[in-house]
Amino acid sequence: MTITLNGKPREIADGMTVAGLLQELRIEQKQVVVERNAAILPKQRYAEETLAEGDILEIVHFVGGG
Amino acid sequence: MRITVNEREHHLPPGVTLARLRSEIKPDADLMIVNGYPADADQRLAEGDQVVLIRRGEQPAEEELDALLSARHSPGIQTRLRKACVGIAGVGGLGSAVALALARLGVGQLIVADFDMVEPSNLNRQQYFLDQIGLPKVYALRDTLRRINPHVRLTACHLKLTAANLGEIFTPVQVLVEAFDRVDQKVMLVETFAACCPETPIVTGSGMAGYEPANSIQTRQSGQRLFVCGDGETAAGPGVGLMSPRVGIVAHHQANAVLRLLLELAP
């Protein structure tokens, strides 16, 4: 199925969770904030939230310093 | 003729002298500036002249200070800023600079939180001074802001922000600024605050180390209420330190984003 990831279409497997997608992208959970359909997702939901066709996902990376 | 005195417009008879103006408006002034230059009492004024009458060492009263500070601002925004409440999580390199910028703007209330003390190595980029070394940053910042605009109400929280306490501390704010140093803290703040205050925008900082070109720093929006200021890439680390120019640029991107959000504009 197709979702939009950071503004670009992406094909993902049915039943993919947010946690699974981050793993596939080799992204460390603790360095990102994930927004699903404009709502910021708490970390404890990453393994529970199954993505759906047409979802709009933003993965926002943070780096240290400030 | 119309003459502006201390940023307020007055209507005066033609040919009035500076001395006469002073005696009517501010008799105790000992420094008079006309159109940007110091002037003598016997100078005759002309239509449109901008006069500043100062008594050295005097601090203006709240109303006058408000008018003076906002004289350079675009019209109509001052009332909104005075009623605004902004939170700043962390007052290191980013947070201290944001706090100063917002105080100079005349934002009415700031809530700042940080557990840290001023150390000498902070002085390369943080808005603290040699005589503040050892003080908790939030109290040093409060002292500094009082010297700029004592009418800004600052709530100084000398504590470590955690998922458990930050909601209660920052509930009153209209905008929250994330000004932490560590990635895990940045992420924790964004997620926790979004859960407790989903309608409130949060302006974060990410990617500001070193001395890469300034033009790589931007303000980006993500979703409805998350804003990220920085280049998004340049992490602080060994060999890539935090230096005042880029840290200051990100801090002022954040301050400008706050200003625009308070005026209900998209950053």
Image: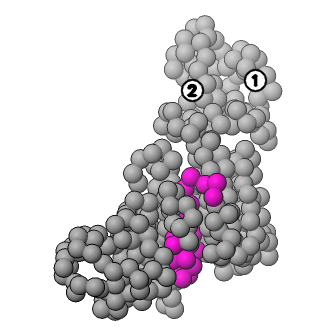
Q: Is residue A41 above or below residue B68?
A: below
Report the magenta residues as a range: B171-191
Residue in view at x 44 percent, y 70 percent: A40
Residue B44 image point, x, y percent: 61, 16
Amino acid on which disc 1 is placed: Lys
Residue in view at x 65 percent, y 68 percent: B166
Q: Earlier in the sequence, mark 1 or mark 2?
A: 1
Q: Quadrant of residue B132?
A: bottom right
Residue in view at x 50 percent, y 33 percent: B75
**B115 on left or right of B126:** right
Residue B44 shows in this picture: no
Subunit ID for the residue under disc 1: B
Count the labels in the image: 2
Quadrant the N terminus of chain B occupies? top right
Query: For numbered disc 1, what is the local secondary structure?
Result: loop
Amino acid on which disc 2 is placed: Gln
Residue B36 image point, x, y percent: 57, 34
**B227 on left or right of B159:** left
**B50 on left or right of A19:** right
Check if residue A39 falls in the magenta segment.
no
Residue B232 image point, x, y percent: 39, 75
Q: Quadrant of residue A48?
A: bottom left
Determine which residue is flagged by label 1: B26
Q: Which mark is residue B50?
A: 2
Say which of A50 and B23 sits in front: A50
Quadrant the C terminus of chain B occupies? bottom left
Residue in view at x 76 percent, y 29 percent: B29
Label 2 packing within 10 angstroms: few (<14), some (14-19), many (20+): some
Check if residue B179 falls in the magenta segment.
yes
Residue B109 image point, x, y percent: 67, 50
